[in-house]
């Protein structure tokens, strides 16, 4: 199980995901199920979904307008989004994240950092996205789920929150489940097998049936390294560099 961080020990507030969205009914969605859902019900973390439209000023509750310079689609208005952000960050909850394909790609190191903090404010874009000035004036951290274009930030927010929540103390069971997972030590995870020991003519690797813990551990590390090297040369390079740094120290 994850250690409770100093920040979490000191802060009395429970880890909070505050989502700004034009579709609050999309929440909790998948976050209400399984591990995250149970933890939500148990009060391990908090979820607040706020409708950005409630901050619109006019009687039509307008949140978007046409882009200056022309072009397709609509852009979310800075004044409306800024008012929503003002309300969401008033108690100091941070980081304030704008989910966008133009952002830094999220990775497990970022997720670990966020899970160790007090929570996050997540702004979900729609249409063509957000007026650039509100991103700049609020100093939003721009984060992408990957090199894909979603129709809105909500699925990205759900993915980011899910990744954080499973790291919170008390959410997952066995400590080793996390420690050997993909990315936790800079490697992809080793392959898994369960019963039956032979299926469609394919046998489970002999070593896994041996009961020899040290040999199993060594085999899994080799498999994790081989998978990382062939599938993710970028991760492999970083892993090799940090391994040789560790040897030099
Ligand atoms: N016009 C934008 C572009 O080309 O970069 C795409 C806008 S997209 C249709 C609408 C919203 O979905 C974005 O404002 C953003 O909040 C969200 N979104 C789309 N792809 C995303 C991704 N890869 N990561 C995070 N959010 C994403």
Image (cartoon, rainbow, N blue to C red):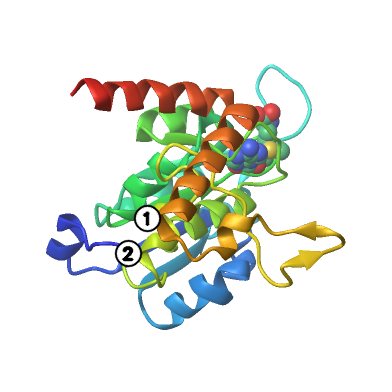
Quarter of the image with the N terminus is bottom left
Q: Nearer the viewer, mark 1 or mark 2?
A: 2
Q: Which mark is residue 15?
A: 2
- Where in the figure is residue 199, as x and y percent of width and height? 81, 65
Q: At 63% across and 49% down in the image, what residue appears?
A: 62
Which picture quadrant has residue 53? bottom right
Query: To which residue does mark 1 refer?
Result: 88
- Total labels: the figure holds 2
Give how far apart the Cα atoms at labels 1 and 2 are.
Answer: 15 Å
Crowding at dot 2, Cα within 10 Å, few <14 / some 14-19 / many 20+, comes out as many
Determine the quadrant in which ligand 1 lies.
top right
Is label 1 in a helix, a strand or a loop?
A: helix
Q: Which mark is residue 231?
A: none
Q: Nearer the viewer, residue 93 or 207?
A: 207
Q: Is residue 51 visible?
A: yes
131, above or below 16, in the image: above
Q: At 61% across and 47% down in the image, what residue appears?
A: 153
Which picture quadrant has residue 230? top right
Check contact, mark 1 vs mark 2: CB within 8 A. no
Relative side of 77 to 196, left or right: left
Quarter of the image with the C terminus is top left
- Where in the figure is residue 115, as x and y percent of width and height? 35, 54
Q: Nearer the viewer, residue 29 or 236?
A: 236
Q: Earlier in the sequence, mark 1 or mark 2?
A: 2
Q: At 51% across and 39% down in the image, what residue appears?
A: 222
Relative side of 238 to 95, left or right: right
224, above or below 234, in the image: below
């Amino acid at each position: 199980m994850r250690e409770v961080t100093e920040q979490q020990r000191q802060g009395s507030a429970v880890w909070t995901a505050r989502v700004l969205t034009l579709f609050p009914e999309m929440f909790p969605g998948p976050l209400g199920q399984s591990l995250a859902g149970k933890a939500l019900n148990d009060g391990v973390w908090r979820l607040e979904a706020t409708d950005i439209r409630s901050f619109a000023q006019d009687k039509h509750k307008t949140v978007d307008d046409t882009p200056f310079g022309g072009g397709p689609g609509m852009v979310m208005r800075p004044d409306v989004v800024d008012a929503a952000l003002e309300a969401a960050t008033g108690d100091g909850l941070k980081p304030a994240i704008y989910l966008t394909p133009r952002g830094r790609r999220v990775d497990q190191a970022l997720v670990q950092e966020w899970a160790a903090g007090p929570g996050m404010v997540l702004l979900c874009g729609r249409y063509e996205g957000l007026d650039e000035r509100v991103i700049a004036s609020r100093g939003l951290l721009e984060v992408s789920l990957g090199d894909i274009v979603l129709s809105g930030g909500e699925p990205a927010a759900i993915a980011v929150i899910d990744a954080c929540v499973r790291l919170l103390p008390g959410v997952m069971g066995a400590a080793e489940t996390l420690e050997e997972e993909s990315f936790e030590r800079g490697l992809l995870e080793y392959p898994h097998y369960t019963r039956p020991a032979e299926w469609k003519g394919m046998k489970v690797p002999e070593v896994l049936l041996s009961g020899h813990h040290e040999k199993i551990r060594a085999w899994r590390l080799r498999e994790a390294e081989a998978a990382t090297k062939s599938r993710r040369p970028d991760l492999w390079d970083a892993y090799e560099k940090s391994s040789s740094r560790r040897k030099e120290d």
